[in-house]
Amino acid sequence: MTDDLHRRLPPDFVWGVATAAFQIEGAAHADGKGESIWDRFCRVPGAIADASNGDVACDHYHRVDADLDLVASLGVDAYRFSVSWPRVLPRGQGDWNEAGLAFYDRLVDGLLARGIRPYLTLNHWDLPQALQDRGGWAARDTLQHFVDYARGIQRRLGDRLAAITTHNEPWVIAMLGHDQGNFAPGIQDKAVAMQVAHHLLVSHGLALQALRADGAKAPLGIVLNLGAAAAATDSPEDLARMRLDDARGRRWYTDALFKGQYPAEVLAELGAAAPRVEAGDMATIATPMDYLGVNYYTRVVSSAGEPFDVKTSGLPLTDMGWEVYPQGLTELLLSLKRDYPELPPVYVTENGAAFPDTLVDGRVHDAARLRYLQDHIAAAADARDAGVPLAGYMVWSLLDNFEWSSGYAKRFGIVHVDYATQQRTPKDSALWLRDLMQRVRQRRATTA
Ligand code: FCB
């Protein structure tokens, strides 16, 4: 059943759409913006599949008012976006760039004027290159620069925000950025990656403490990318591997955040690549959060032997080659509730899918994406029914945009973007979400 989704979640459930600065803003060199590590990484030959970059992207920086009208037309409650750190602090520290701050003022005020709640993320990957030049997230100094940045953003915008997220997906920054090296800054060093993972978490805790000391009004949290744990077979070897992968990818972050410790089995296998942990770090990481954001796209199938081939699973695959596995969202959320009974409110802060869309006569019939969203919202509702404190759900993404090392070829938007003209066209999935939001609002009106 998908036409009862508006009834399966409570009237105060927060419905939203999500974006990130580097993926949509463009204006990479406008109005005093500094260089980010992604601006630099896009120049590395072969780094981006279509050799593209974020210079123009969706040109959201220059089209913010029309884009906010678009968000409003969907009728959603919330808009999740990120601040480009180098746009407001071109060198990562020191002098603020007033033009950059003014842009986010305008964005936040524009959301509030349209009745949409701003969910702000401080770090959605576009670290100022000036800080990378001084060691980036591997350098302990960066933690204090992040705290200063967080405090400045709260000073300027904090009274108008619905939430402040410190980091988006620390696993991706650490592992893809510093171990596999296929994301900025393109480093391939396991020990560095684990130090980065640790520093991201410590800086998260330090920022929470500083923002609260400054009188934070907005709820504070972090966003993790988490898959559902699965094993290729029921063999003891595959199941053991599944538990280890789950400890590496999920519990490394959630045990640290909710228990103040790293999983012993991961520390043991890391050996000399384990991060340097200073006294007090683990308690800092475990600073209580007001909410946890979860980005869910697919499951992770573990195998002790040859890597699992998703093409053999029989599940539909998205354009990213990711399995469509909605019940994994239920399983994942239940695993969080099981492992951390004191779980704060949880938001699904990203969920969505890339499919090869075609624009014909002003329409995009993205039936597969629409179905994906319906099935995942239903799976989220199942988790809520089973006791998970689920507070909201946000679609990734509002717009087709720059999908990191995949460039512009992968389209995650519920709104199609013609990159030659910057024309926006709501896909069928957007029209469906708009109808769902209408039913949500009617129900709120009758239950008020
Ligand atoms: C997540 C990122 C987001 C987007 C989606 C598809 O890992 O947070 O920016 O690229 O994946």
Image (spheres, rainbow, N blue to C red):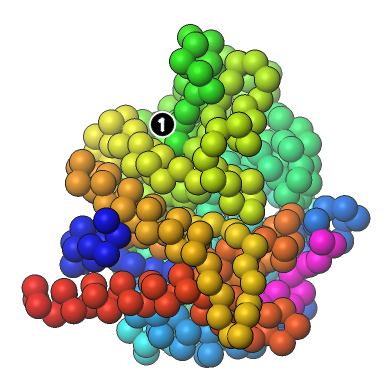
| First to last magenta residue range | 50-61
Q: Quadrant of residue 115?
A: bottom left
Q: Quadrant of residue 88?
A: bottom right
Element at label 1: helix
Image x and y of residue 3, in percent = 27, 64
Image x and y of residue 2, in percent = 30, 60
Question: Image check: 422 left or right of 414?
Answer: right
Question: Image check: 71 left or right of 436?
Answer: right
Image x and y of residue 168, in percent = 53, 54
> Eyeballing the image, is 443 above or below 195?
below
Q: Residues within 10 Å of mark 1 (few under 14, many from 20)?
A: some
Q: Amino acid at mark 1?
A: Asp
The residue at which mark 1 appears reads as 255
Q: What residue appears at the point 53 percent right and 10 percent down from the top-left corner?
A: 237
Q: What residue appears at the point 68 percent right and 43 percent down from the top-left corner?
A: 176
Image x and y of residue 11, in percent = 18, 67
Q: Is residue 421 visible?
A: yes
Q: Quadrant of ligand 1?
A: bottom right
Give yes or no for residue 59 being in the magenta stretch: yes
Q: Nearer the viewer, residue 205 or 354?
A: 354
Q: Residue furthest right?
A: 45
Give yes or no for residue 33 being in the magenta stretch: no
Q: Quarter of the image containing the N terminus?
A: bottom left
Q: What residue appears at the point 49 percent right and 11 percent down from the top-left corner?
A: 235
Q: Quarter of the image containing the C terminus?
A: bottom left
Majority secondary structure of magenta residues? loop
Judge: label 1 CB < 8 Å from ligand 1: no
> Eyeballing the image, is 194 above or below 324?
above
Q: Residue furthest left?
A: 447
Q: What residue appears at the point 46 percent right and 70 percent down from the top-left corner?
A: 429
